[in-house]
Image (cartoon, rainbow, N blue to C red):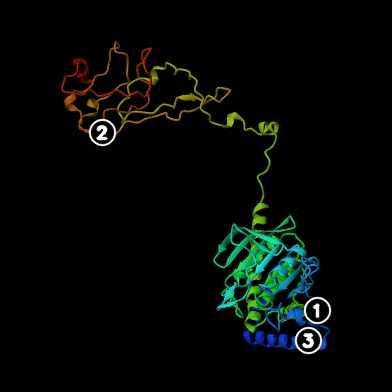
Amino acid sequence: MELLPSLLSTLKSVDSGTLEKEYNVVRSQTSVLKRGSSLSTEVGALKENIKKNRYKDILPYDQSRVVLSLLTSHSDSDYINASFIKGAAADSSYIASQGPLSSTVIDFWRMIWQHDVKVIIMACREIEMGKKKCECYWSPVQQSAAFGPFTVCNKEETRPDEDIVVRNLTVTYQQDSRSVTQYQYLSWPDHDVPYEAAGVLELLEKAKNSQGTHSSPLLVHCSAGCGRTGVICALDYIHDLLVTEQINTTDFSIMNIVLELRRQRPSAVQTKEQYQFIFTAVICMFERLLKAAAERRLYFNLSQQKKPTKPPPVSKRLSQQPDMNDTYAVVNKPKPPPTADPAHFAVAPPRSTRTLPPSPSHYYDNDPAGASAAAVYSTVRPRTKPNTLPLSAMPIYDTARPSNHRLEEGLLPVEHLSSTDHDYEDLSPSVPDMTLCSPGSIGFNYRIQKPRGPRDPPAKWSRLDR
């Protein structure tokens, strides 16, 4: 796979003029093969076999033809217009065959049964351009048909896309049954090429998946068994070269591969357009393989990312617990009552002469030694009010006391309160001249609601502090 980028770059750099020259070389070399080599077509040219050939000029070489040894009747011969083609792997091969005639359908099934064929690729339609290109050698879906001693049942017929028909066939011969899968490609005109290469590659991928590890030959046929059949064999051969790592940048040549096919099957890859299509399809194949390899690497990298470390043992985790003295946990347990110091609960003097005492101490629940710390909420200062009255007449709201406790400090009448005052007033902390709050009082920094409503306040609330 490491050579794919270099091979892909080389294939993309080949122009149409070079491809035309290469195909002319293929044709001239084929003529040399026929004249100077030991290749012959004598069996196919016999009088009794002439009628078994769809085209008189397309005859299998004697050296690579398929010899039928399975005899089903006394009139059977060993001839069929089909050739073996060696695959890239040692245990792989193809049978390149013409489409069967009405007189050779039984021979076609004899060949399939003899070589235990599991997958058939059909690269043509039965009728093209108004001419019969291939005899129908299968039955309608969910029906059976007899071809001599062979019974073919079409179990299922599907169309994964508009170009491909898949038929699952069951063939029975002498009470023995086998499964055969046929892939028919519908969009390949005779002596022409498909409109895109991806469809042919999809066809090959599906066929190879069905073939699996079975070592029987892959049967490929069109009408004559040379043009379209040769292209399919060439593409599958190149794919297997990559998979088996038998390909390199120095001697990889599509022209040599086509010439090798033609040594085994006459006129394989029949036209210049078909030869050019091989280049187009191989470029598409390499790009797909590179993309698939990149996706596999990405998936591998993601799966190899650092996984979460295993948590330490419980004993180690407990030993690493922080000291509770360093935390500020909230524990709901009662706090000690504040010290009954008279200085904490007296009325504050006027703002101009007032001094703040040291902040009272608070105890945190998680301090084992009971050490004191500065109070978080130690002082609350009153809001500033307009000095409309003399300082001696400013209203002072004391901390709450029990109802039976006599207040010594007086308050201003209600009519002197500002309409902008809030319902609650904040008090500042205590100063030394405060009076001790009686036991049972709520405590420091308490807020008392101002009197409301039209009723007159009690007389004891209206006294001024002299």
Residue highlighted by disc 1: 62
Which image quadrant: the N terminus? bottom right
Q: Which mark is residue 385?
A: 2
Which residue reaches farthest front?
74
Q: Are marks 2 and 3 in contact (CB under 8 Å)?
A: no
- Of 424 and 201, the residue lying toward us: 201
Q: Residues within 10 Å of mark 2 (few under 14, many from 20)?
A: few
Residue highlighted by disc 3: 34
The image quarter containing residue 126 is bottom right
Visible residue check, residue 293: no
Residue drawn at point x = 75 percent, y = 63 percent: 113
Compare marks 1 and 2 and give the one earlier in the sequence.
Answer: 1
Residue type marked 3: Lys
**Image position, residue 43 (x, y; %):** 79, 80
Q: Residues within 10 Å of mark 1 (few under 14, many from 20)?
A: some
Q: From mark 2 to mark 3, how far is it between C-alphas?
A: 121 Å
- Of 306 and 430, the residue lying toward us: 306
Which image quadrant: the C terminus? top left
Q: Residues within 10 Å of mark 3 (few under 14, many from 20)?
A: some
Compare marks 2 and 3 and give the one earlier in the sequence.
Answer: 3
- Of 357 and 190, the residue lying toward us: 190
- Of 377 and 231, the residue lying toward us: 231
